[in-house]
Amino acid sequence: MDRTSSSLDSHRVLYLLLSLIYVFLSFFPAQSAPQSALITQIPGFSGTLPSKHYSGYVTIDQSHGRNLFYYFIESERKPSEDPVVLWLNGGPGCSSFDGFVYEHGPFNFEAAKTKGSLPQLHFNPYSWSKVSNIIYLDSPAGVGFSYSENKTDYYTGDLKTASDSHTFLLKWFELYPEYLSNPFFISGESYAGIYVPTLSSEVVKGIDAGVKPILNFKGYLVGNGVTDDKFDGNALVPFAHGMGLISDDLYEEVNKECGGNYVYPVNDACGSKLEKVDKNIEELNIYDILEPCYHGTDSMKIKTTTNSRVPSSFRRLGETERPLAVRKRMFGRAWPLRAPVRDGIVPTWPELMNSEDVPCTDDEVATSWLNNETVRKAIHAAGESLVPSWELCTSGIRFTHDAGSMIKYHKNLTAKGYRALIYSGDHDMCVPFTGSEAWTRSLGYKVVDEWRPWTSNGQVAGYTQGYENNLTFLTVKGSGHTVPEYKPREAFDLFSRFLAGQPL
């Protein structure tokens, strides 16, 4: 064999090897996720995880030492193709572990059987990670496990939070570039009604400006979200009347005196009637009018013995398919009735109540798990010198609402073709569905899917109305403020169908 044919054979072999490598990489793309972020064991859970979990920090300001904490779960289905979803809890000041522990995370938490022991974790059949890759982000700095070495960063607001979260996303996708081509969605609830559209707007601005990396942003979801002071503020009275919480007579009187404006009373007579409305509903659980609200004494607790005269339907309130019942006592920043978020400082409940006693609170399971030293080490959380303790919702930040109404954000985003799902638990009195229904209608979009029931597991799960420009409004029947906690199956169905672009 001469040298020429030998050289040709060598080239053919090399070409064949390169072709095989290319084919292999096409089917098995390189994993770029930082191995130092991989979670190898989860205290309280003894099984084998169906997908990889990662967690850690992204530094968004080196000079200040400002670091945002994330917990990332690969999809249990097909992580290389399934959407990437960012989840944000509200507050402002509440950790997104609220969603992880109590709502749609990979585990159902069972309360510890003995004092000082860890909660037991079991698979959640309705985890959102079954159909998506999901990032739980503690935002802004000072919330959950996120922190800054410069405490001035704890004075923040809507616009800075959106900018920081956008910086986080750009840096996160640099760490996990294999997900950059996946469809990307932003989701959240409550005060995340501000976080989600403001961050979505920052993402779109970055895409339009060609900021690298280019995110494959497709749309967003908001549950029981704060949106606009007038629409949200005027929602309570119609909600209370429609739910039978105030009489026809009082409803007519308050309408007569206030002229439909319940946010800013126009005169003393209007204010007096609104006080009567408040008096009628003040003992209710603001987050779910169906649920009892404990006020610090055992006298409020419902007897559940077989001899109880309480109807069985009422005794079943709070029951779910989870081992841990829905919290009858919700912790979070809320706002006085008819006083939704307005421009300026957003106060905490203790500030509003002039005390440390937050009404309707219970975060024991999450607090005991996330403040356990072995858990914190396993999920790569900062030490106590940087984050002394994890709190579900903190009063350690000073937060200013400085983005105004979200209606202009929603209009701009949907006009550009981004998909939006606005959903509401229909028994939430904190951010009543009546306000969300009203502001979505106010955009003036043509109705393309007229008001109708939607179903889950063969049952009517709520009602929906679809508008042009990919905007959908939806209610979840019988649910409170945190829909995936109260109605996990229904929440999973609406989430998975929306991501897939299927009819609700």
Image: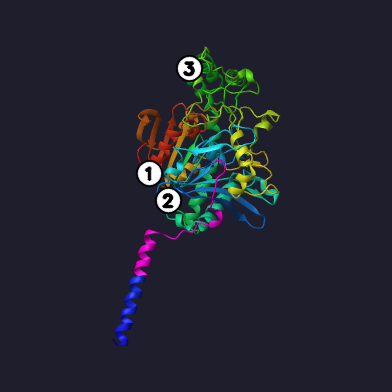
Q: Position of residue 362 (x, y in %)?
A: 61, 31
Residue at position x 47%, y 42% in the image: 410
Looking at the picture, tell me which residue is in the foreground, 376 or 232. Answer: 376
Check disc 1: other Cα within 10 Å, few if <14, some if 14-19, many if 20+.
few
Mark 3 or mark 1: name the one nearer the start of the chain. Answer: 3
Residue 444 visible at all: no
- Numbered tag placed on residue 500 in the rendering: 1
Residue at position x 42%, y 45% in the image: 415
Q: Amino acid at mark 1?
A: Ala
Quadrant location, the C terminus = top left
Q: Quadrant of residue 331?
A: top right
Number of dots carrying numbers: 3
- Numbered tag placed on residue 394 in the rendering: none
Residue 463 visible at all: yes
Q: Is residue 441 magenta?
A: no
Q: Marks 2 and 3, Cα distance to the nearest angstrom?
A: 43 Å
Q: Marks 3 and 1, Cα distance to the nearest angstrom?
A: 38 Å
Q: Is residue 248 left or right of residue 496?
A: right
Q: Which residues are magenta?
A: 18-44
- Numbered tag placed on residue 79 in the rendering: 2
Helix, strand, or loop for circle 2?
Answer: loop
Q: Is residue 56 left or right of residue 82?
A: right
Check disc 3: other Cα within 10 Å, few if <14, some if 14-19, many if 20+.
few
Looking at the picture, tell me which residue is in the foreground, 181 or 27. Answer: 27
Q: Amino acid at mark 3?
A: Ser
Looking at the picture, tell me which residue is in the foreground, 22 or 42. Answer: 42
Residue hosting label 3: 312
Q: Position of residue 252 (x, y in %)?
A: 51, 16
Mark 2 or mark 3: name the one nearer the start of the chain. Answer: 2
Helix, strand, or loop for circle 1?
Answer: helix
Q: Position of residue 100 (x, y in %)?
A: 53, 40
Mark 1 or mark 2: name the one nearer the start of the chain. Answer: 2
